[in-house]
Amino acid sequence: MTHERNPGIPLDMGWVNQVRVNLSATERRAATLTTRRSIKKEWQAAWLLHAITLIDLTTLQGDDTPGNVIRLCAKARQPVRDDLLAALDMAGKPVQVGAVCVYHSRVADAVRALEGTTIPVAAVSTGFPAGQSPYKQRIAEIRESVAAGAKEIDIVISREHVLTGNWEALYNETCEMRAACGDAHMKSILATGDLATLRNVGMASLVCMMGGSDFIKTSTGKEDVNATLEVSLVMTRAIRDYHERTQYQVGFKPAGGIRTAKQALNWMILMKEELGDEWLQPHLFRLGASALLTDIERQLSHFATGRYAAKHHMPMV
Amino acid sequence: MKVAEIFETLSYGPAPESAAAANAWLDEHKRKFDLFINNQWHAPKDGQYFATRNPATGDTLAEVADAGAADVDAAYQAARAAFEAWRKQSGHTRARYLYAIARGIQKHQRLLAVIESLDNGKPIRESRDLDVPLVARHFYHHAGWAQLMEQELPGYQPVGVVGQIIPWNFPLLMLAWKIAPAIAMGNTVVIKPAPYTPLSALLFAEIVAEAGLPPGVINIVTGGDKSGAAIVEHAGFDKIAFTGSTHVGRILRRATAGTGKRLSLELGGKSPYVVFDSADQDAAIEGLVDAIWFNQGQVCCAGSRLLVQENIAPRFLNKLKLRMSKLRIGDPLDKGIDIGAVVDPVQWHTIDGWVKRGLAEGAEMFQPEGELPAKGCFYRPTLLTNVGPASAVVQEEIFGPVLTAMTFRTPKEAVALANNTRYGLAASVWSENINLAIDVARKIKAGSVWVNCTNMFDAASGFGGYRESGFGREGGKEGLYEYVRPAWQARPRPQLSGAAANGTWGKSVPGRPAPLNGKAGDGVAIDRTAKLFIGGKQKRPDGNYSRAVQAPDGHTVGYVADGNYKDIRDAVEAAHAASKWAESSGHTRAQILYYIGENLAARAAEFAARIVAMSGRTTEDARAEVDAAISRLFSYAAWADKYGGSIQETTLRGITLAVHEPLGVIGIACPDEYPLLGFVALVAAAIARGNTVVALPSPTQPLSATDLYQVLETSDVPAGVVNIVTGARDALAKTLAEHDDVDAVWYFGDAEGCRQVEMLAASNMKRTWVGYGERRDWLDAHQGMGEEFLREATQVKNIWVPTGE
């Protein structure tokens, strides 16, 4: 699916300053979103299969080597056992993950391993996860990853600019990073766990979209608190707001701590309810995860067989 | 549907909660239920049953006993027989029983939730996540009050046997709100569930029996209006507690008038939902879903009147319409729906009738599209715009999923629109500006105000209305007082004179010169005929008549102005004009009360002499009365800044403030006895807490009050805070009791007058405090001053403020 990329707009501080987020009300909505909806039986199986197509299958470890990245890519190509797909009447259907997400050093390995597929490689960048390396190097890092074949770049923002209220600096940084990405899609990681307040999350979301982000993403997975439904609500509402005023669609990626099929369904419900069905497609929604895939497979197995599944029956990531 | 297809559409599918256990329970009872009396099932004496239906399908769920007067009496007798033993149990013992009920509810919580949704049509999410947990919470919290009663409510006794009538919108929760505080305080009850929704109460009956409560403490009689009337008309009950419509509440107020039965009423509402431009708009939209589409809008405190700041209105209403289009309507037992079935076809037609009337009056309607279930009682969420304060749909309670929307320009206008209603149950205020939000919360006249949240309930916070939304609170410590009376006070047994029957009550012929009786006047003394005291000025009465004040021996002590209904009208206007008194600080009010005391003390001998002259009592006795009056002034000066309220320990993260607000304008008919002390004790209590008053002095000895004019004038009492109208007390009290802009009437005349005042007060459901013609020792610190006075002078507003950034 193609859609017009968000080119960004001039920084509009009048708009940014209007952001109001009430913590308790946000918490209440987050808590009841998932108790207001229930996805069962065939619907659960179908939604979970779809969830797989949204996954940015990720490994971001110091001990990543070509070996485990190649194994990850193999899983990305074939995320569900054939017999399960057949049992679900989905044999031959396009069930593959949304992307494979690695550090820059592993981009080339992943690109090779995914040759012949349409699965893009995403690289975390700009001094991931803290974003405290020299600015020029952060921009250069983007260019190198793009050159190595990354089609998606997950940048980290300078949290400093949010915490000091230097929205112009955040905006300018985002614009430059977007320029460095070129044709690669840019996901801006807000690292919401570092941003202290939901209002900061809302304001940073808007500024990052104004700066031309294709996606806004919650977390690196390395902060103390990663993806939560509360910050996701604030970010998706900012996306809705931005779309309403500019007509540009920006994607959303929660990441960090999403390990269970139930969680994946919760985020899908959030997207469907707050943004609508179009935001359930991979061009506008990704789930940053690794262990999630195995849990989804187990749930699918349970649906297909009626028995609870063993982890070791699922091909490991 | 195939997985492959859903994989593409990502639609929602059905997710029904199983009704297997609920159906088995109904089947085990052969789908026929009797009355729960003395912990046992009793068939109704006349053998009548009625059907209760599932509104989502129209199917009959069970047949339920239709209690007649004889059945109500049997239940009453059971409760009466159980009362003495139950009240004598230690608080700890009662706490154990309440605790057992709470545990029983939790043990059967899913079954209760499913039964509730089957019978009422509310979504299982609500019955499961809100109703039933709140029910358990209510019993836990009140187990605690039972445990603490001896320490926390010393000097109080239970009211007695209580008749309770509850509505169909929250069948089990309203039952809990009624029963828990009643039995915690040592009362026994007969409760009547609503005929649309009796089943959860019957399952609750089994939990009561399982918990081993002494037989007769809780009796449950099912039935309709006839059964309700039998409770209200039964002479034995010591109190009636009712939740339901203002229309029925008014009938109950009149039916119980003058009986000495206590009454608490939780009635209708048309609650404002105020959204400022400084609000988190998405949060406010979500709040609206909880406000008006919770329980299909069949909620007495539903936020049904949206008031949105004009500068954000178009965008906000667009957001709202988008959100409405996401609401899912359907099978109440489906775990994925937002809106279930309206309780009954009758209610559906009532709702639809209002909407049609709104459209006829020019309203524009928005309803989201989408399929409704083929059968069952479903109504789409509805938004009505292009409406104004004059629209019927804005004024009247619709009790359905219908929201009206209006705009405002300024905070002042928001408050004015919010208060432009006869109701006062609840309100929501949305703004991230805490200064604005709290200020508006204080100014809206409603019992519960939710800041940046809505429809919050908790056992630790009292719920109940201002104005025609009723009186009394349920929950919190304030709610306990509905079920206790001071230990010194027996259940009133008013002796009615029958003056009402012959139409003489409240009638009066203007005053004339007193018969001479051989006692000539003293022409040398300068005449001091007291005028009226209205708006800080001494005014001639409208009718220009005067009444003689005579001593017991028949000689004329003096004359007072003979006020009439127009003087009352003027006095009420003056009292309203002085409403800033409520905003003055407690310290300021205290200073003025002390000053009154000081000036009264300076003239103590003169006041004592006046009492002697009017009453023939001894000087010593009169002096004691004057000294007590001075002491009362000091007491209420002391209380002026010490009864502001408290923090409620609710489950909310944040602060729930119980604010003791003044009632507004109180009409006070003072007792015949103690002409000075009776006046001072009542008026000082009222004004200490920020009310303004229209006082009717003792009819036989009014000069003590009129002598106070000069004291009040020299004590910096702002004009209009205290207005005094002399004349025929009952005729004047009648005008006050009927007056729709008087917020409360206190009446300490005879039993017949008390009955009349309670009856007439039903016009605007003003609060009343009457003595039923029974003597009160005004000199006694408990009877003539207690906490009762402060409670009568205030109403509790609970302001919920969630916190966190």
Image: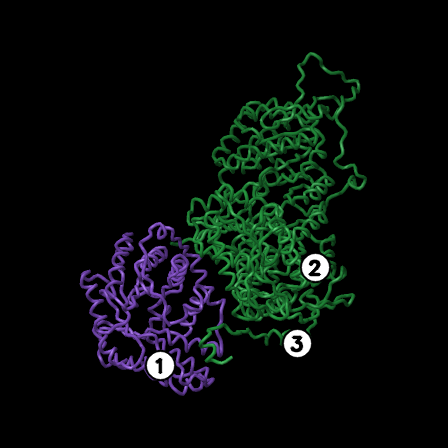
Mark 1 highlights which residue? A79
Mark 3 highlights which residue? B27
Instruction: Compute the Cα span from label 3 to label 2.
Output: 33 Å
Can residue B344 be seen here? The reply is: yes
* Image x and y of residue B738, in percent: 68, 39
Residue located farthest toward the right when viewing the structure as drawn: B502
Which structural element holds mark 3? helix
Instruction: Compute the Cα span from label 1 to label 3.
Output: 49 Å
Mark 2 highlights which residue? B81
Residue B167 against residue B644 in the figure, above or below = below
Callout 1: few (<14), some (14-19), or many (20+) C-alpha neighbours within 10 Å? many
Can residue B95 be seen here? The reply is: no
Give the camera-side residue of A50 and B480: A50
Q: In the displayed structure, does residue A130 sit left or right of residue B384?
A: left
Q: What color does chain B have in the rendering?
A: green
Amino acid type at mark 1: Pro
Amino acid type at mark 2: Ala
